[in-house]
């Protein structure tokens, strides 16, 4: 059988350029090392069963390089009545980082890493930007959008975390002032106090009552602005985008969690929390870093030509400023359960990083340098390397861009990692997607190589790969090229 290196040489020769090739994959040629990351993990700071140090010990046991903790930031739902909807209200609260202490959370992550130096701990967050109510209390009160969450990585300043603009966390600094409301409370309070001090006896009583009402109004109205109005009766995309932009402005990254998730409706306390998949939110928002492309459901948006490709095509045609990368989200709470989503070493995100440290891991996440994966068991795991575009000017791997005059060579090598031989009777289905269209479909036993020499038109282009075998899957992030002078 012709070697992979010889095939690459032939393709590069056909494309009209030569580069120094070695047996090393493109990722390793550029000095990257693969880090296995378990992302979307909950600890006892929210509703997980284990402390962060315990989780780090499990990651160490399973040889996980990166542990992405995403405890809930604030999980509070409130329904109020009358003009004082904060003071006269009923609420439900679950534990979260904000109530348990942001500094304690960050310190626990540092302590866990100090005990297990081989595990990089990313203390992230899971946040619900907004929710809204429909219906009438006592009959058909319904809560929407509370299950649409954003995962946040890269925020390390406790003050920036404390001011996250999410519903139920309105502060003076993360809201815009409603000056009418502010001056209204002040004028009412001033009038009440003036009447209580200077007016006749009857009017004094009225003034005291007015001042008391104004104080209640002031307490209810604080901070005289809102992150989102839960009584608007509709989704608040402005609030969602505000959170994404806030995270980005503070050097963090936002990932949409489970955009196609289908949860059963939950009835509690006289209200129903309605769950609806909303994949279109990926198209309707900007500047987020990525989304969970593999999780415990049948995901459709990552199929060739579907929503993810439509967004990527919009990006290469310069309709969007950013492109979304895919990660695997395991939503880990405990080891109880079956199916692989209650384990660390099956639902993984592979990151290509320069070094094994926090800054390098965050850089790999920020660049989308890697792929999402789910493995049918811990012993036999799909592995992707040499996923690259080569041109006369250089090499690009997932998340990167290489310039070219139009001639490129695209490559990918897929194998079973951890197995001495391919699994018997386990062919894989390989889809190669270019610019939103299925370029090639192949059924093959592993190891398998994809190698193509192509001439592309002027503009931006991308390639991505999807590999499936039973419940095992790899979803590569795209690799881009910019044709500056094409045919």
Image (cartoon, grey):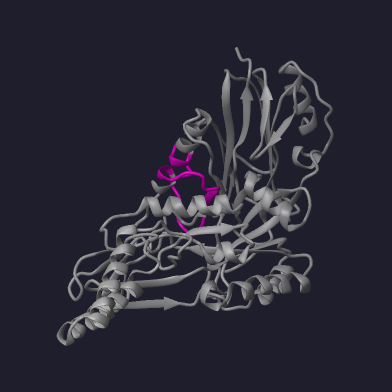
Q: Is 224 or 143 nearer to us in this picture?
A: 224
Please tell me whether residue 346 belongs to the stretch shown in magenta.
no
Confirm whether residue 470 shows in the render.
Answer: no
Magenta extent: 283-308
Q: Position of 166 compared to 333: left or right?
A: left
Residue at the (49%, 52%) spot, across then down = 244
Left or right of 251, for residue 175: left
Give the residue displayed 47% in from the left and 38% down from the top: 311
Residue 179 in the image: above or below residue 75:
above
Quarter of the image holding residue 11?
top right
**Type of secondary structure dominating the magenta stretch:** loop
Camera sees residue 254: yes
Farthest-out residue, bottom? 201
Is 293 in the magenta? yes
x and y, in percent, of residue 399 in the image = 64, 40
Please give the count of numbered marks on the rendered protein: 0
Q: Out of 398 and 244, give the one closest to the viewer.
A: 244
**Above or below, comparing residue 130 to residue 325 in the picture:** below
Asked whether, in this view, residue 54 is left or right of residue 193, the answer is: right
């Amino acid at each position: 059988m012709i070697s992979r290196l010889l095939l690459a040489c032939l393709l590069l020769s056909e494309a009209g350029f030569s580069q120094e090739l070695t047996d090393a994959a493109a990722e390793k040629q550029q000095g990257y090392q693969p880090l296995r990351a378990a992302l979307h993990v909950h600890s006892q700071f929210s509703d997980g069963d284990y402390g962060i140090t315990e989780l780090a010990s499990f990651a160490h046991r399973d040889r996980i390089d990166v542990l992405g903790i995403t405890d809930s930031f604030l999980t509070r739902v409130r329904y109020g009545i009358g003009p004082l909807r904060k003071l006269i209200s009923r609420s439900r609260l679950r534990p979260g980082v904000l109530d348990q202490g942001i500094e304690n959370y960050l310190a626990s992550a540092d302590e866990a890493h100090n005990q297990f130096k081989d595990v990089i701990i990313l203390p992230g967050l899971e946040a619900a930007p907004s929710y809204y109510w429909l219906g009438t209390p006592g009959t058909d009160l319904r809560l929407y959008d509370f299950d649409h969450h954003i995962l946040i990585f890269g925020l390390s300043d406790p003050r920036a975390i404390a001011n996250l603009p999410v519903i139920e966390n309105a502060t003076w600094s993360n809201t815009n002032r409603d000056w009418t409301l502010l001056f209204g409370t002040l004028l009412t309070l001033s009038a009440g106090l003036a009447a209580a001090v200077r007016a006749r006896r009857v009017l004094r009583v009225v003034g005291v009552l007015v001042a008391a009402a104004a104080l209640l109004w002031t307490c209810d109205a604080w901070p005289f602005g809102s992150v989102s109005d839960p009584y608007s009766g509709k989704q608040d995309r402005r609030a969602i985008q505000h959170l994404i932009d806030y995270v980005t402005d503070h050097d963090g990254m936002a990932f949409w969690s489970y955009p196609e998730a289908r949860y059963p409706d939950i009835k509690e306390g006289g209200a129903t929390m309605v769950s609806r998949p909303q994949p279109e939110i990926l198209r309707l928002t900007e500047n987020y870093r990525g989304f969970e492309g593999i999780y415990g459901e049948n995901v459709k948006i990552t199929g060739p030509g579907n929503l993810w490709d439509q967004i990527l095509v919009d990006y290469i045609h310069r309709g969007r400023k950013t492109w979304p990368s895919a990660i695997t989200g395991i939503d880990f709470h405990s080891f109880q359960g079956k199916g692989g989503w209650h384990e660390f070493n099956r639902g993984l995100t592979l990151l290509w990083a320069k070094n094994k440290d926090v800054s390098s891991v965050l850089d790999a996440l920020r660049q989308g340098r890697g792929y999402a994966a789910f493995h049918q068991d811990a012993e036999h795991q799909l592995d992707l390397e040499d996923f690259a575009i080569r041109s006369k000017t250089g090499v690009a791997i997932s998340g990167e861009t290489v310039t070219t005059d139009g001639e490129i060579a695209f490559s990918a090598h897929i194998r079973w990692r951890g197995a001495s031989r391919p699994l018997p009777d386990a062919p894989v289905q390989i889809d190669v997607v270019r610019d939103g269209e299925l370029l090639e479909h192949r059924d093959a036993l592993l190891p398998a190589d994809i190698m193509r020499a192509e001439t592309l038109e002027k503009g931006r282009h991308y390639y991505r790969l999807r590999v499936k075998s039973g419940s095992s899957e790899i979803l590569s992030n795209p690799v881009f090229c910019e044709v500056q002078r094409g045919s």
